[in-house]
Image (cartoon, rainbow, N blue to C red):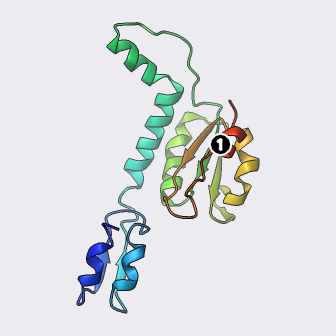
Amino acid sequence: EVAGRPLGGMNAVQVVQTLSAGIDHVEPGLGLLPAGVRLCNAKGVHEASTAELALALVLASLRGFPGFTHGQDKEEWRSGFYPALADKSVLVVGYGSIGAAIEDRLEPFECARVVRVARSARTTARGPVHAIEELPALLPDADVVILSTPLNPSTQGLVGPRFLAAMRD
């Protein structure tokens, strides 16, 4: 609502440029624009930083960083064994340019496999991309699941009790 609100008053605008990879947040206001307005997104701007963040969060989760941080606050040494990303099966849900960039960053970590999921099935140079409808059958074999989807009506509620129940412990 906030992003689309000013669009109705832009009578002479020719181009609308979003600062995000997606345009979902402005779609409700697009009908308010004059005909012929060009809509541009920022595809290509955020892939590297978003993929780095995804990888950092995966590693932090697997290696127990939150526990180390909480232990540090309490002056506790929390040693133990934590799983590596190597030899894990990783499911990347949302295989657009950001999902592909995430896969780029996973490569040096020697994952057993990377399974790609997008709205529709297709074949890429790296291998098959599964349709989102296949997700329930793919979840039980995944050690790590990375979501890189827009938040829109098609993904709203994607992760819920049934999704979580289908995953490995």
Q: Residues within 10 Å of mark 1 (few under 14, many from 20)?
A: few
Q: Residue at x 30, y 66 (%)?
A: 2
Q: Position of residue 118 (x, y in %)?
A: 62, 60
The kind of secondary structure element at disc 1 is helix
Residue 138 in the figure: left or right of residue 154: right
Q: Nearer the viewer, residue 22 or 84?
A: 22
- Please state the horizontal and vertical placement of residue 50, each as a whole percent of the image: 41, 49
x 49%, y 43%: residue? 105
Could you say where residue 101 lies in the image, as x and y percent from the top left? Answer: 48, 52
Which amino acid type corresponds to the residue marked 1 in the rendered image? Pro
Q: Residue furthest bottom?
A: 35
Q: Which residue is mark 1?
A: 161
Residue at (38%, 80%) from the top-left corner?
30
Q: Residue furthest top?
A: 76
Picture quarter with the C terminus: top right
Please state which of residues 45 and 61 is positioned toward the viewer in this rendering: 61
* Residue 50 visible, this angle: yes
Q: Residue at the right extreme?
A: 137
Residue 147 to residue 86: above or below: below
Indicate left or right for 36 with 107 as reference: left
Closer to us: 169 or 38? 169
Number of numbered tags placed on the structure image: 1
Give the quadrant of the N terminus.
Answer: bottom left
Residue 116 image position (x, y, % from top left): 64, 53
Q: Image point 23% across, 90% down: which residue?
A: 12
Classify residue 134 as left or right of residue 160. right
Residue 131 visible: no
